[in-house]
Image (cartoon, grey):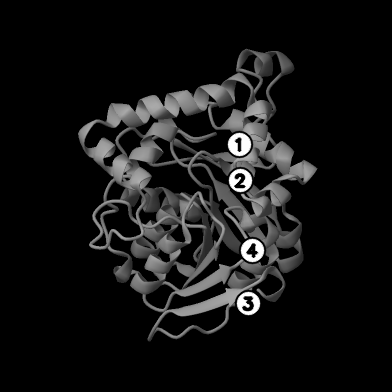
């Protein structure tokens, strides 16, 4: 394990004003020589929970550590290949990720752990549930994406999703070009990009992200995302637009699905689909929440992993709730 030194201010200025490395950041050397970056917070002696960021984000967006400290959680946020501090792995597939996670868990001394996958991190979490089920205690998928390709059902897919699948299969350069345009605005002025993005979000997400510390975290993420350029984002987008390599019905880990009914980034229909496919999955719907309910409900999400309720494997359970009743 390598602890990362804080770069000099001169070095910072040479790499597009990227944020200084946090004292909690470190990297692990994997078997093939790649580095896997992560940020650790919370209770160092607590129950381990791995956090998987979404598409277009990094370990930086992991929620603040106060709840982890209070609940006795050792919180570890991993960067996927080509993102943040992690070495790229061109051509990777979704089911390549569990092996990176297994190696990280071994080096960090984690015989068992729980997982939170947010948004585009949801499929990566479910891949771990499929491949590492004997080491995972519980899993929460928050605003998580369902398969875009290879699924028998298509009714939960938007036209945007269908077009992404077609592009990934026939003309992946289209996805690369789209991500280049999207990323150029972030790299040019991360703060302005954040403010413009905020105006297109639902009122619930605007309220969540207006909190000053979280706003700063999101702007810092836009810089950190391109620490190594845009290849990592391109790889991620292709992975999510291609078949997963497994069916969610094969998962045998206890999974809770958390979703806001106002989410326009990942439609709630995707969580409904996953709830029907994953044996024993429980879907928690929040009528007045959007895509970023992760931050408002973070103590409840962590608490559900630390103090899990028994779940039936007979049929999916659906809980329609408001914020105060999670």
Dots 3 and 4: beta carbons under 8 Å? no
Give the vertical position of 216 relative to 317 (above or below): above
Write down the residue under mark 4: 288
Dots 1 and 3: beta carbons under 8 Å? no
Say few, some or many: other residues with alpha carbon within 10 Å of mark 1 (under 14 / 14 to 19 / 20 or more): few
Q: Which mark is residue 201?
A: 2
Gap between marks 1 and 4, in whole Å?
20 Å
Residue at (37% x, 43% y) in the render: 160
Gap between marks 4 and 2, in whole Å?
13 Å
Along the viewing direction, whichever of 68 and 237 lies nearer the viewer: 237
Write down the residue under mark 3: 307
For mark 3, give the secondary structure. Answer: loop
Q: Which badge, 2 or 3, is on the more N-terminal residue?
A: 2
Say few, some or many: other residues with alpha carbon within 10 Å of mark 2 (under 14 / 14 to 19 / 20 or more): some
Image position, residue 47 (x, y; %): 62, 66
* Quadrant of res 146: bottom left
Residue at (60% x, 39% y) in the render: 26
Say few, some or many: other residues with alpha carbon within 10 Å of mark 3 (under 14 / 14 to 19 / 20 or more): few
Image position, residue 213 (x, y; %): 77, 43
The label nearer to you, 1 versus 3, is: 1
Dots 4 and 2: beta carbons under 8 Å? no
Q: Which badge, 1 or 4, is on the more N-terminal residue?
A: 1
Image position, residue 61 (x, y; %): 62, 44
Say few, some or many: other residues with alpha carbon within 10 Å of mark 4 (under 14 / 14 to 19 / 20 or more): some
Along the viewing direction, whichever of 70 and 279 lies nearer the viewer: 279
Residue at (50% x, 49% y) in the render: 265
Dots 1 and 2: beta carbons under 8 Å? yes
Gap between marks 2 and 3, in whole Å?
32 Å
């Amino acid at each position: 394990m390598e602890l990362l030194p804080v770069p000099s201010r001169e070095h910072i200025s040479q790499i597009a004003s990227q944020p200084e490395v946090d004292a909690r950041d470190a990297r692990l050397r994997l078997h093939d020589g790649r580095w896997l970056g992560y940020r650790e917070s919370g209770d160092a002696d607590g129950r381990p929970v791995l956090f998987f960021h979404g598409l277009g984000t990094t370990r930086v967006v992991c929620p603040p550590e106060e709840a982890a400290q209070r609940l006795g959680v050792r919180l570890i946020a991993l960067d996927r290949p080509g993102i943040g501090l992690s070495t790229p792995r061109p051509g990777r597939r979704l089911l390549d990720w569990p092996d990176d996670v297994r190696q990280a868990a071994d080096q960090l001394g984690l015989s068992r752990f729980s997982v939170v996958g947010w948004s585009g991190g949801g499929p990566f979490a479910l891949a771990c549930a499929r491949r590492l089920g004997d080491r995972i205690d519980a899993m929460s998928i928050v605003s998580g994406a369902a398969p875009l390709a290879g699924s028998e059902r298509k009714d939960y897919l938007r036209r945007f999703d269908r077009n992404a699948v077609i592009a990934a299969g026939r003309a992946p350069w289209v996805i690369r070009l789209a991500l280049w345009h999207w990323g150029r605005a972030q790299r040019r002025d991360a703060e302005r990009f954040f403010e413009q993005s905020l105006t297109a979000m639902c009122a619930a997400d605007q309220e969540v992200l207006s909190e000053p510390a979280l706003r700063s975290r999101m702007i810092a993420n836009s810089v950190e995302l391109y620490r190594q350029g845009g290849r990592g984002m391109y790889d991620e987008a292709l992975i999510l637009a291609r078949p997963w390599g497994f069916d969610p019905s094969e998962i045998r880990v206890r999974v809770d699905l958390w979703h806001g009914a106002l989410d326009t980034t990942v439609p709630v229909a995707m969580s409904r689909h996953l709830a029907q496919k994953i044996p024993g999955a429980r879907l928690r719907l929040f009528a007045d929440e959007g895509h970023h309910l992760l931050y408002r409900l973070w103590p409840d999400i962590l608490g559900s992993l630390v103090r899990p309720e028994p779940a039936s494997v007979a049929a999916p359970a659906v809980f329609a709730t408001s914020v105060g009743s999670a």
